[in-house]
Image: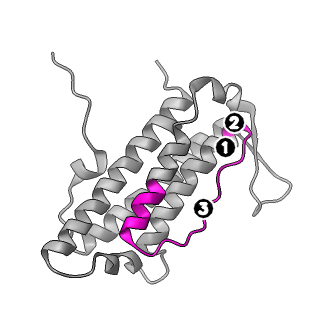
């Protein structure tokens, strides 16, 4: 059985944003245990030409909001990108999750042929299906992975299980 777009965009993105929030909470605890300001992590980068942690989280949330909106022909809420603390990033994730929860499977009806365009490529579009497979999913996981890697490289004790989150194991 193939996954529905609702499972990919709403359920999986929501799950991964929740995992990202848990990763950030681990960073917060790491800083508290070592008695330094948790917000020092926010400007950390893996490389000089990469976005810092705070921007990786903002973009992750934006991709989730934009994906739901683009695939349903609606307008996502605008967030100001003015977070300056870890607590404010938690709030941004929560606001994103609240928005995503407003979508149901039926809202995505016909998403496959929805025209998705970007301001940076005027006069061109991709289909909703191409958008999900070739842009939204890989782009979202790129930024979540970058956030994970930034914190890991700064000494936060994280593992694959933190990234994947709790699995839905079934009894044999």
Residue under pointer 1: 69
- Location of residue 140 in the rendering, given as x and y in whole percent from the top left corner: 50, 53
Q: Nearer the viewer, residue 134 or 56?
A: 56
Q: Earlier in the sequence, mark 3 or mark 2?
A: 2
As helix, strand or loop, the secondary structure at mark 3 comes to loop
In this rendering, which labeled residue sits more in front, label 3 or label 2?
3
| Count of all numbered marks drawn on residues in the image | 3
Q: Are marks 1 and 2 in contact (CB under 8 Å)?
A: yes
Q: What are the residue bounds of the magenta stretch?
A: 71-93
State the separation of the CA atoms marked 3 and 1: 14 Å
In the rendered image, which residue does mark 3 sit on? 79
Q: Is residue 169 above or below residue 145?
A: above
Does 140 appear in magenta?
Answer: no
Marks 3 and 2, Cα distance to the nearest angstrom? Answer: 19 Å
Q: Secondary structure at mark 2?
A: helix
Which residue corresponds to mark 2?
A: 72
């Amino acid at each position: 059985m193939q996954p529905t777009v609702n499972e990919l965009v709403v359920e999986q993105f929501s799950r991964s944003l929740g995992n990202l929030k848990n990763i950030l909470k681990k960073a917060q605890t790491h800083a508290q245990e070592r008695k330094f300001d948790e917000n020092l992590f926010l400007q950390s980068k893996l490389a000089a030409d990469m976005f810092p942690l705070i921007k990786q989280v903002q973009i992750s949330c934006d991709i989730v909001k934009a994906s739901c909106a683009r695939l349903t022909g609606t307008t996502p809420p605008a967030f100001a990108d003015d977070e300056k603390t870890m607590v404010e990033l938690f709030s941004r994730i929560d606001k994103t999750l609240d928005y995503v929860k407003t979508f149901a499977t039926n809202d995505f009806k016909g998403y496959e042929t929805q025209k998705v365009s970007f301001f940076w490529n005027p006069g061109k579009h991709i289909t909703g299906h191409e958008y999900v497979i070739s842009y939204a999913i890989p782009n979202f996981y790129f930024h979540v992975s970058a956030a994970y890697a930034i914190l890991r490289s700064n000494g936060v004790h994280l593992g694959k299980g933190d990234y994947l989150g709790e699995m839905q194991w079934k009894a044999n």
